[in-house]
Image (spheres, rainbow, N blue to C red):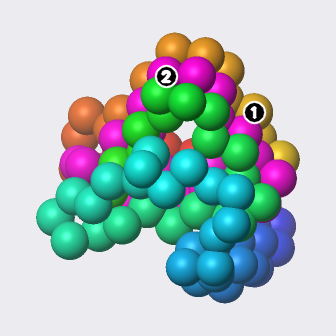
């Protein structure tokens, strides 16, 4: 099971390298923090007001809706494929030893 999870993460990371080829993604939603730009698959939908900051990885076919904030400033946030994050959600890591997986 662990190897299949690791393989899935690797595939998400490989796909997210296409971040520079995004067409319909709201690029103003992505913010660099400590030199790290979020990795967002080109098929992701980001509604108006969304902010994705720092060490965040978002997999294919996911969506973040109005005014959601994902703040990867303390540790990483991974949002898997096909995940739907609803309006006004805040995802934030509070301790360096913890990571968030959605």
Q: Give the quadrant of residue 86.
A: top right
Judge left or right: residue 3 versus residue 26: right
Task: Please tell me which residue is depicted at 23% across the width and 40% down the height of the picture.
Answer: 95
Q: 28 or 70, which lies in front?
A: 28
The image quadrant that residue 81 belongs to is bottom right
The residue nearer to you, when weighing 6 against 28, is: 28
Q: Does 84 sit above or below residue 35?
A: above
Q: Is residue 68 on the magenta stretch?
A: yes
Residue at screen point 36% across, 67% down: 37
Nearer the observer, 58 or 98 = 58
Q: Is residue 99 located in the magenta-colored stretch of the structure?
A: no
Q: Position of residue 25 (x, y in %)?
A: 63, 55
Main secondary-structure element of the magenta-colored stretch: strand
Query: Sequence order check: which comes first, mark 1 or mark 2?
Result: 2
Kindly report which numbered mark, 1 or 2, lies closer to the viewer in this rendering: 2
- Image position of 27 (left or right of 60): left
- Quadrant that contains the N terminus: bottom right
**Residue 84 circle label:** 1
Q: Which residues are magenta?
A: 55-81
Q: For numbered disc 1, what is the local secondary structure?
A: strand
Residue under pointer 2: 67
Identity of the residue furthest to the front in this view: 23
What residue do we see at 77% from left, 72% from top? 8
């Amino acid at each position: 099971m662990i190897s299949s999870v690791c393989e899935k993460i690797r595939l998400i990371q490989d796909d997210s390298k296409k971040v520079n080829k995004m067409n319909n993604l709201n690029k103003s939603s992505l913010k660099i923090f400590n030199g790290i730009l979020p990795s967002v698959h080109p098929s992701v939908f980001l509604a108006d007001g969304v902010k994705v900051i720092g060490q965040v990885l978002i997999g294919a076919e996911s969506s973040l809706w109005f005014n959601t904030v994902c703040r990867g400033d303390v540790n990483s946030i991974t949002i898997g494929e096909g995940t739907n994050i609803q309006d006004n959600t805040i995802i934030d890591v509070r301790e360096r030893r913890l990571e968030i997986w959605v």
